[in-house]
Structures are given as C-alpha cells and as structure tokens.
Amino acid sequence: KCIAKAVSSEDWLAARLTDSVDKYVLRISHYNKRMESIIPRNDSYAYHAAVVAAEMTDAIFFRISSLREPKTTKQVKQRALVDLFKCLKEQGYSSMKWSVPPNIRSPHDMLQLPVPSLDNISSWDNSAPAALEKGESYFHRCQVEITRLRFEISMFGSQYMSQREMTLMQGYSEYILFMICQQRGMIANMIQSVHGIESFIQLYDSVVDTIPMGQNKLSDDTLSFEKSLLSLIEGLHQ
C-alpha cells in the first residue's frame, strides 16, 4: 500500500515503463496473500505427506525393535524385509537402477549439488538455521550409510539375504537418496528466491517521492522479481 501511494500509475507511465511493471509493483499485497494461501496447512498435500511419512517411519522402527527379540526366527525377519519392500513400492519408490541418474553414485558429482545456506539473512524464523543444519546432518549421514551399504554388498554380501534382496535394498536406498537430493536442491533454490524477492521489495520500498534514475535496471529487476516469485511458488507446491 505504501508503494502504491508513493508511486502512482501516472508516474510509471511518465517514466515510459510498461504496464506489466506497474501491475506487478502495485499488486505486491496480492502476491503476499497468494503466498500465504499455498504455505502448507492442515489440509495441504504437504501436510498429509508428512503425516504418512511419520506414520511409516514409526511403524518401521517399531517393527525393527520387535525383530531384535532373541527368539525372532529367520523367517519372520525375511517376511519383515518383504513387507518393507512392498510398502516402499506402494508409496511410489522404485528399486530400478535406471530410476535414478548415474550421478547419484559419483561422489564428485554429489559435491557439485547446491548447498542450502541462509547467509545471515535476518528475515527467516529463528528456528530455520537449526532446522537447516539438522537436515544437512541427515543428508550427510545418508551419504555415509549408502556408501557403506554399497561396499558391503559388493565385497562381502550377506548370509541372511539373497542377491536379489540386496539389489532391491540398494536400489531403494539410492532412490531415497535421490529424492533427498531433489528436496535439498529445491530448498536451496527457494532460499535464493526468497532472498531475491526481499531485495526487490527493498528496492521498491526505496522509491518514495520520485522515480529514481536507472529505470531500465528497475524494469529488469521487476521481471526478475516475477521469475523468482514463480520459482518460489513452484518450489512450495513441490
């Protein structure tokens, strides 16, 4: 609203800016409401997916604890493994080697992935840095575990699992790691989008009395703002 009062449509037209620039600048509040409407809530897909993931994780760890009982037979453990594979498949996971890019097996390529970082951005919630650090720690632990799994399967094998079961386990593990890499990349992209949007808003907020010099740059920044906003919305949807 402050931007709309400080800079009118006539001001933008007098500066020979396109109507689209005027529209995006004056509809900042509309974009804010739009962003609030797609943030995960109790009725969103993201919320329901988080509930399913939490319930499945709790069920897996509960069953693992029961399998550690001294009198648990080999047949019961094998059945639990089969049930786990079946559950993962029902949830859309794939064990096929071609379902993940070969780069997921290359440590060098994994190091090329973008790293989420807040970079001293003060507008984030106080819990965001700790949550981001916790997620990074989990990602690195996953890398260590899957490297160990690959080594054990290729060098030692298992006296309790068949070769097919070990191949399935490695396939599902690599697919899960691939999904984690995708989520990590989207988080990094969203952080950059938010940072870009904040920079553009600060630029618009600096327009107080008259339209400043450098209108071509401001016009380019407005288009970049639109791209960052659309990128952020797509990231939130995914």
Image (cartoon, rainbow, N blue to C red):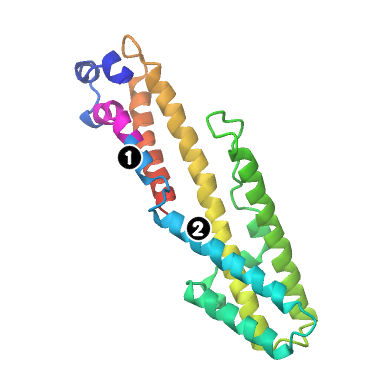
Q: Nearer the viewer, residue 121 or 64?
A: 64
Residue 66 magenta-drawn? no
The residue lying at 55 percent from left, 34 percent from top is: 125
Q: Amino acid at mark 1?
A: Arg
Q: Chief secondary structure of the magenta span?
A: helix
x and y percentages locating residue 150 in the rendered image: 72, 73
Mark 2 residue crowding within 10 angstroms, few (<14) / some (14–19) / many (20+): few
Please state which of the two labelled residues, at mark 1 or mark 2, is closer to the viewer: 2
Q: Which residue is disc 2 drawn over?
A: 50
Whether the residues at callouts 1 and 2 have beta carbons within 8 Å, the answer is no
Residue that label 1 marks: 34
Q: Nearer the viewer, residue 102 or 127?
A: 127
Q: Is residue 102 visible?
A: no
Magenta range is 21-32
Q: Earlier in the sequence, mark 1 or mark 2?
A: 1
Residue 152 image position (x, y, % from top left)? 77, 76
Quadrant of res 46: bottom left
Horizontal arrangement in the rendering, residue 30 relative to residue 198 (left or right):
left
Q: Position of residue 17 (x, y in %)?
A: 25, 24
Task: Work out which quarter of the rendered image holds the C terminus and state it.
Answer: bottom left
Q: Determine the secondary structure under disc 1.
A: helix
